[in-house]
Image (tube, rainbow, N blue to C red):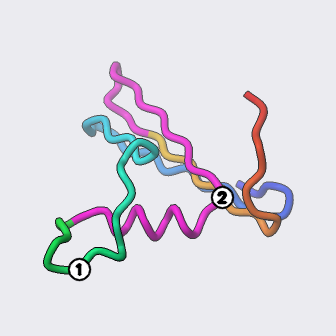
Amino acid sequence: MAVEGGVEVTLVDSDVERFDPTRAPDVDVHAPIEERRPGGLGLHLIRRMVDSIEYQYSDATRQGRITFRKTAAGPTARAE
C-alpha cells in the first residue's frame, strides 16, 4: 500500500504458529562467529531497513500478519 513518502507492505501467513518478530531478541553482530547461534540475521536486516514493524496473530484462524513500513522521512511516532 502506498503511504505518504513511502510504502507499507503486509504479509499474511496462514496455518502457522505464533511468532512475533517484534519481540525476538536482537542479534549480537559483533560477537565472534564461533559464539553465535544460527538464526536471527534476517530479522536484523529487516529491522535496519524499515521504519516500523507491526505484528498481529489470530489464534482462531492461526493466521499471522506482519506489516512493514518504510518512508523517506524515517521512523515517526504513531498515535495509538
Q: Residues within 10 Å of mark 2 (few under 14, many from 20)?
A: some
Percent x, y for residue 75?
73, 56
**Residue at figure coordinates x 37%, y 67% from the top left:** 42
Please name whichever residue, 25 or 74, is drawn nearer the observer in this view of the structure.
25
Give amino acid for label 2.
Asp
Q: Quadrant of residue 20?
A: top left
Answer with left or right where residue 5 lies relative to residue 31: right
Mark 2 or 1 closer to N-term? 1
Alpha-carbon neighbours of circle 1 within 10 Å: few (<14), some, or many (≥20)?
Answer: few
What residue is pinned by disc 1? Answer: 32
Residue under label 2, please give it. Answer: 51
65 vs 14, left or right, is right
Question: How far across and down, in percent of the image, does residue 5 sit?
Answer: 84, 63
Residue 32 point in image, percent of width and height: 23, 80
Residue with the most extreme bottom position: 33
Viewer-nearest residue: 52 or 7: 52
Does dot 2 land on a helix, a strand or a loop? loop
- Range covered by the magenta-colored residues: 39-64
Give me the residue at 46% from left, 45% from top: 22
